[in-house]
Structures are given as structure tokens and as C-alpha cells.
Image (cartoon, coloured by chain):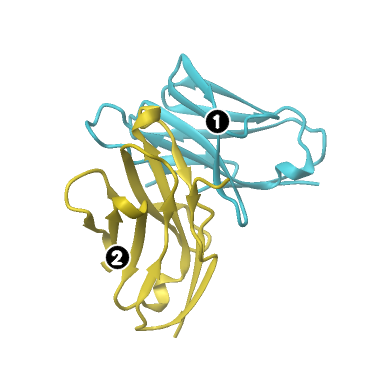
Chain colours: A cyan, B yellow
């Protein structure tokens, strides 16, 4: 059973459309992250949240927004999708309460194609 | 400039060959170091991590990595690879100077093991 789930798993959308990617976790972790993965570029951080009221921009936040609706849910929105946002998107979680543990746990990913 | 460098983008090995994947980072100060693996069509999974102590760390599936502080390196090794090790491998660094808040990933190394 998956601890970190993402919906949808695959999505094809058109330029200019608004789209939301959702992430839910049952691990009870307080920290959540959104990354995008592009071939040859690895994973790059879009946004991260340390609790419901704490949202921070990552290195590539332009064109994206997020919402932390609850400790277990962290959504990523593309307000007006463009083709160069075609990528594999990963949600991750971590637990700040475990001393010295900074391991992040990843969801299965959402493959987004913008035509 | 890439702060976490994985110089080998593609590696092809035969089964039973030895593996060493390079990872160098450009941050000073205290760091936590990780290797993640992504099997085809799957999400990232943690292979191993270094926080402190013995610089030679052992992970799952027979992998190990050595932290050499003077060389800013954290190379991944396996004495004898198997076909099932075909995957993409990511090195990642977390810095104390950012409160260990964010992972910075390398661009990944794609390993193909031929039977």
C-alpha cells in the first residue's frame, strides 16, 4: 500500500489550460515537496512546505502555485500550462520530528504532457 | 553551475562487472548525502545515506558509497552488478547551511546492465 499517492498518474492537457496535480500521504509527515524531473536535468525543486501555514518557493517556481490543504495534502497547480512544463512530477515527504533523519519519500509520479 | 555533479550520464556494463558511479558536490560545510535509485517506470527509492560517522556506508541490494570529505565526493559502488540493477541513479545533497531543508539532486546516471 502506497504511503505517498499522486493523482492523476498521467495527464495530457492543452496549452493555456489550468491543471492541478494532487499529492496525499498517510505517513504523518509534516514536510512535503514538489519536484519536476526532466531528462538530463535530474530533479528540481518547485515548492516545499514545512507545515500547513509554511509554503516556500524552490528553484523553479515560476508558472506554478501550490496549496497545502491539510498536513496530508499538497497540491500543485499550473495556472496556464505551457509545453515546456511537460515533465514527470514527483511529490515527496519527510518527517522533521525524527532527529537526524532527512530522508525524503517519493510518490509514484505524474507524467504531464502539455500539447 | 551544477552544484551536484554526476559525470557519467550513461553507463553500460555486463552482468558481474563492478560498478562505480561518481558524485561530486561543490558545497562547503556540513552536508548529508544520499543516493536514490529509480527503476524503469517507478518512483525514487533510497539506496543509502550518509549523515555522520563511518564514511563508508552500506545500503540495500549490495550497494555501498564512500564519503571523501577532502574530495567532496560520494561515489556509489557495487562489486558485481545484476541485470536487475538497470535503473537511473541520483546523487543528492542536503546542506546544514540551509537547515537541512532541501535536497539538491545531480542530473542522474542511467545504468544499463546487459545479461
Whether residue B7 is visible here, answered yes or no, is yes
Give B96 or B27, whichever is nearer the viewer: B27
Which residue shows up at 36% across the image and 32% down it? B100
Instruction: Give me the residue at 50% from left, 45% from top.
Output: B3
Q: Dots 1 and 2: beta carbons under 8 Å? A: no
Find residue A20 and report its horizontal and vertical position in percent. 65, 31
Q: Residues within 10 Å of mark 1 (few under 14, many from 20)?
A: some
The image's mark for residue A58 is 1
The foreground one among B59 and B18 is: B18
Which quadrant of the structure image shows residue A80? top right
Determine the image quadrant of residue A39: bottom right
Please report, as a chain letter, where disc 1 is located. A
The picture places residue B41, in percent across and down from the top left corner, at 53, 60
Give the answer, above or below, for where B89 lies relative to A20: below
Percent x, y for residue A16? 82, 33
Classed neighbour count for the residue bearing mark 2: other residues with Cα under 10 Å, few (<14), some (14–19), many (≥20) = some
Pick the quarter of the image with the N terminus of chain B.
top right
Q: Residue B63, which numbered label?
A: 2
Q: Are marks 1 and 2 on the same chain?
A: no
Q: CA distance from mark 1 to mark 2?
A: 30 Å
Q: Is residue B48 visible?
A: no
Q: Quadrant of the C terminus of chain B?
A: bottom left
Indicate whether A98 appears above or below B54.
above
Give the residue furthest to the front.
B70
- Horizontally, residue B55 falls left or right of residue A71, namely left
Residue at point 60%, 51% (across, down): A41
In the image, is residue A56 above or below residue B6? above
Q: To which chain does the residue with label 2 belong?
A: B
B60 with respect to B72 (left or right): left
The foreground one among B33 and B62 is B33
Amino acid at each position: 500500500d502506497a504511503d505517498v499517492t499522486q493523482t492523476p498518474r498521467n495527464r495530457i492537457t492543452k496549452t493555456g489550460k489550468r491543471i492541478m496535480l494532487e499529492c496525499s500521504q498517510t505517513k504523518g509527515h509534516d514536510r512535503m515537496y514538489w519536484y519536476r524531473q526532466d531528462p538530463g536535468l535530474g530533479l528540481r525543486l518547485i515548492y516545499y512546505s514545512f507545515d500547513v501555514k509554511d509554503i516556500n518557493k524552490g528553484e523553479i517556481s515560476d508558472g506554478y502555485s501550490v496549496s497545502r490543504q491539510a498536513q496530508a495534502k499538497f497540491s500543485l497547480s499550473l495556472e496556464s500550462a505551457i509545453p515546456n512544463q511537460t515533465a514527470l512530477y514527483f511529490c515527496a515527504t519527510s518527517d522533521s520530528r525524527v532527529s537526524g533523519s532527512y530522508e525524503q519519500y517519493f510518490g509514484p509520479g505524474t507524467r504531464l504532457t502539455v500539447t | 553551475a551544477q552544484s551536484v555533479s554526476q559525470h557519467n550520464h550513461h553507463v553500460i556494463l555486463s552482468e558481474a562487472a563492478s560498478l562505480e558511479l561518481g558524485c561530486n558536490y561543490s558545497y562547503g560545510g556540513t552536508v548529508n548525502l544520499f543516493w536514490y535509485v529509480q527503476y524503469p517506470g517507478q518512483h525514487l527509492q533510497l539506496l543509502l545515506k550518509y549523515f555522520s560517522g563511518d564514511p563508508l556506508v552500506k545500503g540495500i541490494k549490495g550497494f555501498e558509497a564512500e564519503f571523501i570529505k577532502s574530495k567532496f565526493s560520494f561515489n556509489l559502488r557495487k562489486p558485481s552488478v545484476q541485470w536487475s540493477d538497470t535503473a537511473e541513479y541520483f546523487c543528492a545533497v542536503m546542506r546544514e547551511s540551509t537547515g537541512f531543508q532541501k535536497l539538491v539532486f545531480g542530473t542522474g546516471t542511467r545504468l544499463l546492465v546487459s545479461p
